Amino acid sequence: MSGHSHWATIKRSKGAVDAKRGKLWSKLSRAIIIAAKNGGGDPVMNIKLRYAIDKARSVSMPKDNIERAIKRGTGELEGVSYDEINYEGYGSGGIAILVDILTDNRNRTVNEVRKIFEKGGGKMGSAGCVAYMFDRKGIFTVAAADVEEDRLMNIALEAGADDIKQNNDVFEISCDPTVFSQVQDALKQNNINTQSGEVHQIAKAPVDADLETAQKVMRLMESLDDHDDVQNVYSNLNLTEELVDAMSKE
């Protein structure tokens, strides 16, 4: 399994705990609000809103919560106004870190995120310092035992996907974000169940690190991800099986 898939797996396991205390739903509501605010309340016409709704449904967010968030975004209901920001920086060993933020108070958030970086042995950088190291891609994962590779490849590529790779027991489909919905629909129409389907920032050249450095970076990423205003955290760290095993034992 590739690095970003490892991180997604770790986040999903953490997400189960977050959902119990409402944190994950709160983050997803913000994503729906900002998507509806910027592109309208129709998920058919607003792809970003559709991503956000699908993600909310995947963690059993109630329909009423989703609908309220859409209405807050379109202005039909009053609510807090959020800004969409990206923060960039470095972790231990110079590992690049990219953070997606939705906040109602830029000054508060930038100060808090800077402190998290510093406490975790990292440092916030200026805009653009690491963003060029990443490509934005739609990523789907499908259990290899559920479908033949040739059939999956034909369906995905015909729908506009860029590539399919097998990583251990899963197939990983990558696509341009603009065709994410097309690929998603094609998989659903052919009764292919996905383990995950999200738009990620993918490191162009993952960087290897020794176990101690990698663990420090992962702790920093988890601390950032725990912040209420943080939607996603990405790095160019090459997350190996050894590292994930070591982190699971902590």
Image (tube, rainbow, N blue to C red):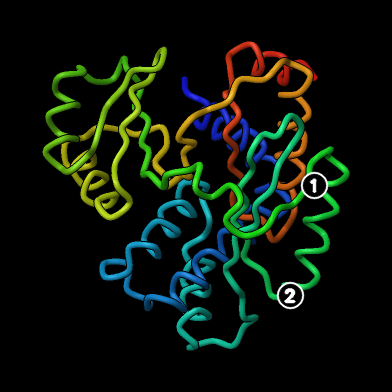
Specify whether 51 is left or right of 219: left
**Quarter of the view holding residue 192:** top left
4 sits left or right of 17 in the view: left
Label 2 element class: loop
Q: Residues at badges 1 and 2 in contact (C-beta under 8 Å)?
A: no
Q: Please, is residue 9 above or below residue 136 in the view?
A: above
Total numbered circles: 2
Q: Nearer the viewer, residue 250 or 17?
A: 250
Tell me the quarter of the image containing the C terminus. Answer: top right
Q: Is residue 42 left or right of residue 152?
A: right
Identify which amino acid the numbered label 2 is placed on. Asn
Q: Secondary structure at mark 1?
A: helix
Could you say where residue 150 lies in the image, as x and y percent from the top left?
15, 19
Depicted 157 relative to depicted 21: above or below = above
Tell me which label, 1 or 2, sits earlier in the chain.
2
* Residue in the picture at 57% in, 68% down: 84
Q: Residue at x 63, y 52 (%)?
A: 24
Q: Residue at x 40, y 14 (%)?
A: 169
Disc 1: which residue: 117
Residue 246, percent from left and from top: 72, 14
Residue 225: % across, % down: 69, 46
Q: Quadrant of residue 140?
A: top left
Q: Where, by quadrant of the figure, is residue 86 drawn?
A: bottom right
Residue in the picture at 65% in, 80% down: 80
Tell me if 146 is positioned left or right of 64 in this view: left
Amino acid of disc 1: Phe
The 10 Å Cα crowd at callout 2, few under 14, some 14 to 19, many 20 or more, is few
Q: Residue 105: which numbered mark, if any?
A: 2
1 or 2: mark nearer the eye: 1
Where is residue 112 shown, x and y percent of the image?
82, 59
Q: Disc 1 and disc 2: Cα gap in Å?
A: 18 Å
